[in-house]
Image: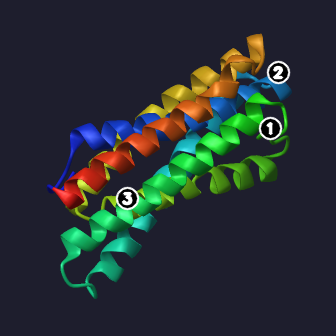
Amino acid sequence: MMGAFSLYDSLLFALALSFESFMVALANGLHNANFSVKKGILLAILFAMCHVAALLIGYALGKTLSNNISEINNVSGWIAFAVLLFLGIKTVAEGIQCALGKKEKVAASLIGFIVQSAVASLDAFAVGFTIIIYTPLGAAVCGGIICFAILLFYSIGFFVGKKFGTRMGKYAAILSGIVYIGLAIEVLLECVV
């Protein structure tokens, strides 16, 4: 992860963000079963674009702040570790709450979908801080990978949710959190080795 761009890490970020998107889409599909295919795809686009925007804003802000920090590679590694560990623990906790039926991420109106997309994108914003070692082109490629993955997972999740409900999606957040924790461990090992 300490190079100008890591396809491997970008794919893992995309996977982790996509699992959460899939879970949210399952719930939205279940509770908005009357939505057309077109509306489902538009929601997937909204969700993906919010994530990419948040990622790039986090990246730009992280790059700006990092210019004032010496030994950026070491410091950014520890920041990335802390952010990813926090995201992992938070996402696993949310997944457990969903699995126990104590929490559902569901929106019903356009404003609700926009707010839901923006709030769900905070994870992507945090990921933006963890990729500050990427070149701008690398960050854009990472954003493209994440956009594609979220479009795909959200669309599938929404239409599966319309058909079958949210039972299998309850565990997607837990898996997403485990991926974040795995990424945090990878970054920690790079910092100490």
User: In the picture shown, does residue 69 fall above or below 108?
Assistant: below
Determine which residue is flagged by label 1.
104
Q: Earlier in the sequence, mark 1 or mark 2?
A: 2
Q: Is residue 164 above or below residue 126?
A: above
Residue 119 relative to residue 33: left or right: left
Helix, strand or loop at label 2? It is: loop
Q: Amino acid at mark 3?
A: Phe
Q: Residue at x 75, y 23 (%)?
A: 36
- Which label lies toward us, 3 or 1? 3
Q: Position of residue 60 (x, y in %)?
A: 36, 71
Q: Quadrant of residue 103?
A: top right
Q: Earlier in the sequence, mark 3 or mark 2?
A: 2
Badge 1, how many Cα within 10 Å: few under 14, some, many 20+?
A: some
Task: Tell me what residue is drawn at x 40 percent, y 75 percent.
Answer: 61
Q: Quadrant of the C terminus?
A: bottom left
Give the side of residue 4 with respect to residue 129, left or right. left
Image depth: mark 3 or mark 2 in front:
3
Write down the residue under mark 3. 81
Q: Closer to the observer: label 1 or label 2?
A: 1
Q: Nearer the viewer, residue 119 or 152?
A: 119
Please tell me in which quadrant of the rendered image residue 64 appears. Answer: bottom left
- The spot of residue 62 in percent (x, y) is 37, 72
| Percent x, y of residue 156 | 59, 20
Amino acid found under the numbered disc labelled 1: Glu
Name the residue beneath numbered marker 2.
Answer: 33
